[in-house]
Amino acid sequence: MSVLPSGSAEPGEHPPAPVNLWFCPNEDLAPGIAATLASYWLDEHEQEVAGRFLFERDRRQYLVAHALVRRALALETGIPEAEAIIWRSSRGRPYLQTPSGGLPRGADLLDFNLSHSHPYNLLGVSRGLRIGVDVERLDVGERGLETIIATFCPEEQEWIARAAPGRPRDRRTLRLWTLKEAYSKARGLGLGLPFDSFAFTLAEDRGVHSFRPPADDSPERWRFLEIDPVPEALAAVAVEVDRAHMPTVHLHHGFPWGRAAPRRLVLPETAGV
Ligand SMILES: CC(C)(COP(=O)(O)OP(=O)(O)OC[C@H]1O[C@@H](n2cnc3c(N)ncnc32)[C@H](O)[C@@H]1OP(=O)(O)O)[C@@H](O)C(=O)NCCC(=O)NCCS
């Protein structure tokens, strides 16, 4: 019987590659540099989307986000930024195409997911298993959170209603929203998955106590992480896990020119309901 802690590598085995999270505010890449990198790195589809924005602010966000994706994927895989082939599912979810000989730095599969909420970008990269991320600003002002709340399960709506109006209630709403988006984005379904078909029970401040998945999924497949990368924003990550090879999480801040020392986080256990 193994005496290693759950998820540890056996002797001689490589530990699982960490899940890398890259939190990058737009200001970390000057507009001129973002535009130059994008002109070299982005593919035809990305260039075309970037050309369609009416407002410069939105174009800048897109350029920084997509330069971030290509740079982080290059660091992970060794595939040069402009050579990564990114394809999209019928629901718009981007995937990295694995070259016929596998990824240059090993592993057959790599999954990534991007979220942007002006002026922040969050990218999650995971080896093999699925990942979904969502970042939202907390200082939302009047943003119709009531409409969002109405899409949640009754028990989640009750939990939100028990918080004081204003920031405490908005925070509960956005914690649930980011977790739900992260999960549905990991599954590639986005808003196509009804948000009242699955539920979270959350700790007071941070952390998922339990997760009731939609009818076609099981709770032990997933781990969730809530992070507050800056005081004005909160974010959630959903990671599909293999319990025998539990990855750690590295949270990087800023544009990934190199590999600055990340913050190391642990994927906490989630109970099913
Ligand atoms: C994915 C979705 C939830 C994005 O929500 P959002 O809060 O506006 O955006 P976020 O910033 O968190 O995420 C956007 C990023 O998610 C990724 N994404 C797009 N579609 C996705 C999907 N179905 N699943 C996971 N990720 C997706 C993209 O990288 C996108 O950024 P990009 O457009 O710059 O490449 C929403 O657009 C959606 O539900 N799309 C699916 C639509 C669909 O089902 N269409 C079917 C054909 S009609």
Image (spheres, rainbow, N blue to C red):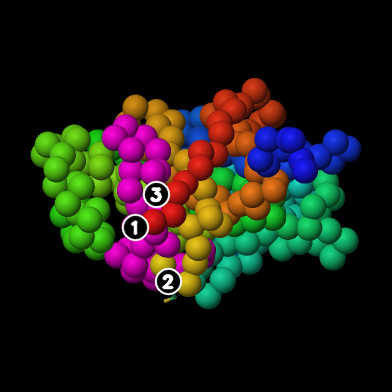
Name the residue that disc number 2 marks: 215
**Tag of residue 133:** none
Quarter in which the N terminus is drawn:
top right
Residue 188 pos. (x, y %): 51, 65
Which element type, helix, strand or loop, lies under badge 1?
A: strand
Query: Which residue is located at x 76 percent, y 61 percent?
Result: 98
- Left or right: where does residue 91 sit relative to residue 77? left
Q: Is residue 216 left or right of residue 71?
A: left
**Mark found first going from the N terminus, 3 or 1:** 1
> Looking at the image, is mark 2 or mark 3 earlier in the sequence?
3
Pointer 3 with pointer 1, Cβ within 8 A: no
Of the four image quadrants, the one with ligand 1 is bottom left
Q: Quadrant of the C terminus?
A: bottom left
Q: Residues within 10 Å of mark 2 (few under 14, many from 20)?
A: few
- Marks 2 and 3 sit apart, C-alpha to C-alpha, by 15 Å
- Which image quadrant for residue 172? top left
Give the residue at x 35% y 52%. 200
Residue receiving disc 1: 199
Amino acid type for the residue under numbered disc 2: Ala
- Figure label count: 3
Identify the residue under disc 3.
210
Q: Which stretch is magenta?
A: 187-213
Res. 83 image quadrant: bottom right
Circle 3 Cα neighbour tier, 10 Å, few/some/many (<14 / 14–19 / ≥20): some
Question: As rendered, which of 7 and 181 lies closer to the eye?
Answer: 7
Q: Residue furthest left?
A: 165
Whole-angstrom CA distance, mark 1 to mark 2, is 11 Å
Q: Is mark 2 within 8 Å of ligand 1?
A: no
Is the Cβ of the residue at disc 2 closer than 8 Å to that at disc 3? no
Residue 32: percent from left, percent from top? 54, 36
